[in-house]
Image: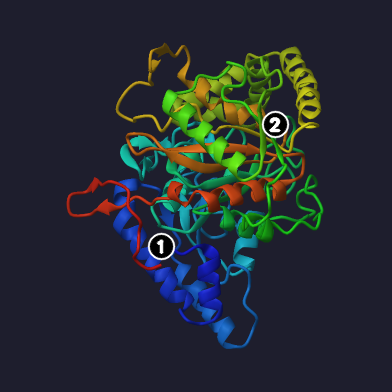
Amino acid sequence: MRKSAGDLATEVASRRVSAVEVAEAFLRRVEERNPLVNAVCTLNPQALEQARACDARLASGAPARALEGVPFVAKDNLHTRGLRTTFGSRILEHFVPDEDAICVERMMAAGAVLLGKTNTPEFAHDINTTNFLFGTTRNPRDLNRSAGGSSGGTGAAVACGMAPVGLGTDLGGSIRIPASFCGIAGLRPVPGRVPVYPTDYGWDTLVEHVHGPIAASVADLGRMLSVLSGPDDRDPSSMPLQGYDYIEAARGKSSLKGRRVAFSPDMNGLIPVDPQVARLVLAAVRRLEDLGCVVEEGCFDASDIREIRAGTRAFGMVARYADLVEPYGKVMTPALARQANDGLRTDVRTVVKAEKMRTAYWHRVRKFMQNYDYIVTPMIGAPAFRLDQPFPTMFGDTKVEKFRDVFLFSYTFSVTGLPAASVPCGFTAEGLPVGMQIVGHRMREDSVLEAAGAFANACPEHTVWPYINMKSTEWMTPEPLTDFP
């Protein structure tokens, strides 16, 4: 059975294994598996030196930290001091930051060892992870399928065992989508829970871009969040600690008896859902009932989410990328340049109207959730799509008008700022993972982690790791990894 970050930290702290041995083992995994998956785009040449520092610290008698000696990877749009950070863009191909992102800084302060940076679509704006610098990241479950985006590199690296945990970012679903496609766990924290810095926008107006954890287990999401959360004056939107024990919550030992769940299989018919996804998520909801939850099918009115998304997203595209289009448009990903130009053509009234609609939308969600502890949905309306074929146009006997609408489950809750987790809930007939989204009340990641952890503990069969046959370079039928660590 693959060891969790918590297990590894315990073994390093007890000195049953050294941090250097752990780092070397994971670096071997990267060397073996990354040529096929293409998840890690830049290795950290200081990784072993960081691991040695952990061992020396313990040898001196210093107390072990929460992530002592645990390897991690960081998405390539997160600043890493002295280590190339490209944002997946040729514009920043040689950019080397002189400071760490706060989330990276906190991971290393807790003893974690940075193995390297993971691939992202240019400036983290696509549901597939590919760019002109490093190419396409492939899904560890099937190399012909997408790992999702925009934290696809982190998701793929964690899913195939190149690191037990990693850092991602999430605006419209960029942590949760790769977690679902790759069969692992991911959490979008509430805005301000994990301070965001460096950034051009200390107050991330409209839909916030958050930093958060991706992990092989729900338990490790809690361990990471306990390290990442807390205020920092470099982010004026960061929130004070609220006293929640995220590690304990994510262990999944809390009773869910009597907790009320609103199950929305397709957001009142708004989002297309593949029949296999629908069946697996419904079965997962039935397991929540077995755990004591009271489940009702229901949903608030989300019919205006497309218009809200268009206006709020246009604002963000102009804010972040409009100034790049004129000098660098020819070297940018065409889709990104087009989105930035489309944003420039969006008038201010449209943006303001979208934000006004978003406020009314929030109050509908708020009032709906007064009767529930959670909203549960599919994470994505379809399993990972193929990289070598057009998007599907049929789900069973049903024609799909706009395949990209399958991703609306994530943005539907991003606009509210509510905490949301993706947890594995089964496999399709083709062996592709499917994720279930658990959404909780405002500022209550602990409650979301309790439900996700309890479900994961009750359904270990949903956590099955892929295995590469390195001799044939084919991705084989998933089976548990038993090799160290």
Q: Amino acid at mark 2?
A: Val
Q: Position of residue 458 (x, y in %)?
A: 53, 50
Q: Amino acid at mark 1?
A: Met
Between marks 1 and 2, how big is the CA–CA gap?
39 Å
Q: Residue 51, which numbered label?
A: none
Q: Residue 1, which numbered label?
A: 1
List the residue tagged with mark 2: 207
Q: Position of residue 194 (x, y in %)?
A: 70, 50
| Quadrant of the snapshot with the C terminus | bottom left
| Nearer mark to the viewer, of 1 and 2 | 1
The residue positioned 45% from the left and 46% from the top of the image is 462
Q: What is the residue that sits farthest to the bottom in this orientation?
A: 60
Identify which residue, 224 or 378, lies in the foreground: 378
User: Which element is circle 2 on?
Assistant: loop
Residue 199 higher or lower than 12, as above or below: above
Judged left or right of residue 467, residue 20 is right
The quadrant where residue 294 appears: top right
Q: Can residue 306 be seen in the rendering of this structure?
A: yes
Q: Residues within 10 Å of mark 2 (few under 14, many from 20)?
A: many
Residue 269 higher or lower than 39, as above or below: above
Q: Position of residue 186 (x, y in %)?
A: 56, 46
Judged left or right of residue 275, residue 475 is left
The residue positioned 54% from the left and 81% from the top of the image is 14
| Quadrant of the snapshot with the N terminus | bottom left
Q: Position of residue 5 (x, y in %)?
A: 53, 63
The residue positioned 73% from the left and 37% from the top of the image is 204
The quadrant where residue 307 appears: top right
Identify which residue, 25 or 263, lies in the foreground: 263
Q: Residues within 10 Å of mark 1 (few under 14, many from 20)?
A: few
